[in-house]
Amino acid sequence: MEQSTGASRDSGVTATPVEHGPETTGRSQRDGYRGLQLGLTVLRIGPLLILLAVAVALSFLSPFFLTTRNLGNVMAATAAIAVLSLGQLLVILTRGIDLSVGSTLALASVVGALVFTTVDSGPVVILAMLATGLLVGTVNGIVYVKGRLPHPFIITLAMLSIARGLALWLSGGQPIRGMPPVVDSIGGGSIGWFPVSAILILGIAFLVFVLTTRIVWGRWIYAVGGNPEAARRTGIPVNKVLISVYVLSGLMAGVAGIITAGRLDAGSPTFGELAELDSIAAVVIGGASFLGGRGNVLNALVGAVMIGVIRNGMNLLAVDAFFQLIIIGVVIVLAVEADVLRGHLEDRFRVFEAARS
């Protein structure tokens, strides 16, 4: 009598061991590498994708959103925040922050209005407003660096109060009406439906892009933000770089003062209230990191436009102003979380790169 030799023989099925050879492991690594690349790409262009998604949604929810008149209004209303965000970007790239830009905007507008009451010259008024921004930015940078303050938060917070107080004192707490025609054209003029201020912003953005990507000074900014001590050891003039970004941030606030004063044909100590928070939000929404060394001009502009689009869309949909603040706050939180996720993916990506090499 024959005995059974096993279930595998009776059923006619032969068990085949699963092999995890080098080919399978290599394929898994390649898939993981491609997945990380895709994830990083999506996160890097994420702000632009979100802006497009918001614009598409609003175009369906409101028939007025995509009209040329409304788009022109969005760009004109966003221009001041956009130029402030370009200056704020340079500061945040070096692990800093500038809380004084809104007050500097107001002070520049008041100084310009006062100068116009005595000197009927558009160029002189513009120079006075730019000089005001430069002066405030220079004080911020020098006090922070030479005073060896632990963080720029301290001096820029103090300057927020000082500049606003000066604006209130110089104006008597009241708006000063009247601006030269050239200032009115810059802030409130348009070519067809396209605002002149938007053209100015594009020109400034191009200059900042060239400064940060095509010259050595721009590389120094990223190096200082990435690792200040390593930058010092390699001979980079860290103190001069730090002072320069605050000077430029102040200059941008002066430009924003020109745009705002021209749009409203006045100088006022109340201009730019909470503008510093909007500029920081725009940069963060655009993907810049408070840890420094990460961010770019395009995404900073996208962040500024996103804030303007959200506010405009909420107004068109008659959403309460309180909810607008909540929505923008939620967007900021999501942007910060996206930055944390991107940092995690970049760490894993470097591990893959090291393994492949």
Image (spheres, rainbow, N blue to C red):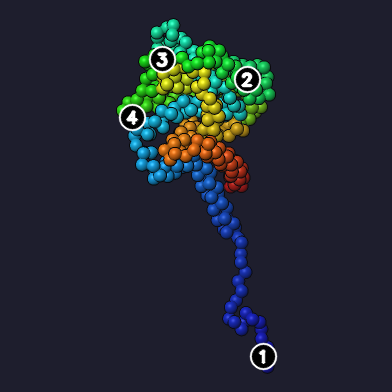
Q: Residue at x 35, y 29 (%)?
A: 194
Q: Nearer the viewer, mark 3 or mark 4?
A: 3
| Residue 124 x %, y % | 43, 10
Q: Element type at marker 4?
A: loop
Q: Which residue is mark 3?
A: 179
Q: Earlier in the sequence, mark 4 or mark 1?
A: 1
Cβ–Cβ below 8 Å for labels 3 and 4? Answer: no
Q: Which residue is mark 2?
A: 158
Judged from this view, the residue extending furthest toward the bottom is 1
Q: Residue at x 48, y 34 (%)?
A: 307
Residue type highlighted by circle 2: Ala
Q: Please tell me whether mark 1 sits on a helix, a strand or a loop.
A: loop
- Say if 154 sits above or below 4 in the image: above
The label on residue 193 is 4
Amino acid type assigned to the residue bearing label 4 in the image: Trp
- Extreme-left residue of the structure: 192
Q: Is residue 273 above or below residue 336?
A: above
Q: Say few, some or many: other residues with alpha carbon within 10 Å of mark 4 (under 14 / 14 to 19 / 20 or more).
A: some
Circle 1: residue type: Glu
Q: Are marks 4 and 2 in contact (CB under 8 Å)?
A: no
- Which element is circle 2 on? helix
Q: Which residue is pictured at 44% across the width and 24% down the height?
A: 204
Looking at the image, is mark 3 or mark 4 earlier in the sequence?
3
* Disc number lying in front (1 or 3): 3
| Mark 2 to mark 3 CA distance (whole Å) | 29 Å
338 or 275: nearer the viewer: 275
Where in the figure is residue 304, as x and y percent of width and height? 48, 32
Distance in Å between CA atoms under marks 3 and 4: 22 Å
According to the picture, the residue beneath numbered tag 1 turns out to be: 2
Quarter that holds the C terminus: top right
Task: Give the SS element for disc 3.
Answer: loop
